Amino acid sequence: MKELVLATSNKNKLEEIKDIVISQGYKIKFILPNKDHFNPIENGGTLEDNSYIKAKAASNLMKMYSLADDTGLFV
């Protein structure tokens, strides 16, 4: 089974991503970064930029491949 860091400290996001991955037939174990050391500054200009910032920070912290998503808030 492959392991990936999910670049979030949101456990609800973890469950959401796991459900999507399982529904597609993939077998991936997601690990959350250490929340005491994971607090990237999401100052990108786009949702994609913020996802990259979080993925890079999680990858550097955990020394593993990472996955991030940034859905943003739309009002």
Image: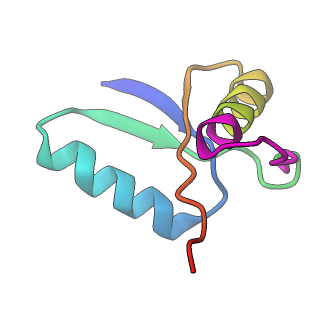
- Residue at 62 percent across and 39 percent down: it is 51
What scheme was used to colour the molecule? rainbow
From the top left corner, tell me how far across and down residue 26 is, in percent: 19, 33
From the top left corner, tell me how far across and down residue 9 is, in percent: 67, 58
The quarter in which the N terminus is drawn is top left
Task: Please give left or right for residue 45 compared with residue 43 in the image.
Answer: left
- Residue at 46 percent across and 57 percent down: it is 14
Image quadrant in which you'd find residue 58:
top right
Task: Please give left or right for residue 59 compared with residue 18 in the image.
Answer: right
- Residue at 48 percent across and 70 percent down: it is 12
| Nearer to the camera, 60 or 72 | 72
The quarter in which the C terminus is drawn is bottom right
The answer to whether 37 is drawn above or below residue 13 in the figure is above
Q: How many marks?
A: 0
- Residue at 59 percent across and 37 percent down: it is 48
Image quadrant in which you'd find residue 31:
top right
Which residues make up the magenta segment? 39-51
Q: Main secondary structure of the magenta part?
A: loop
Task: Please give left or right for residue 40 compared with residue 73 in the image.
Answer: right
Q: Does residue 75 belong to the magenta stretch? A: no
From the top left corner, tell me how far across and down residue 16 is, in percent: 36, 61
From the top left corner, tell me how far across and down residue 45 is, in percent: 75, 42
Residue, far bottom:
75
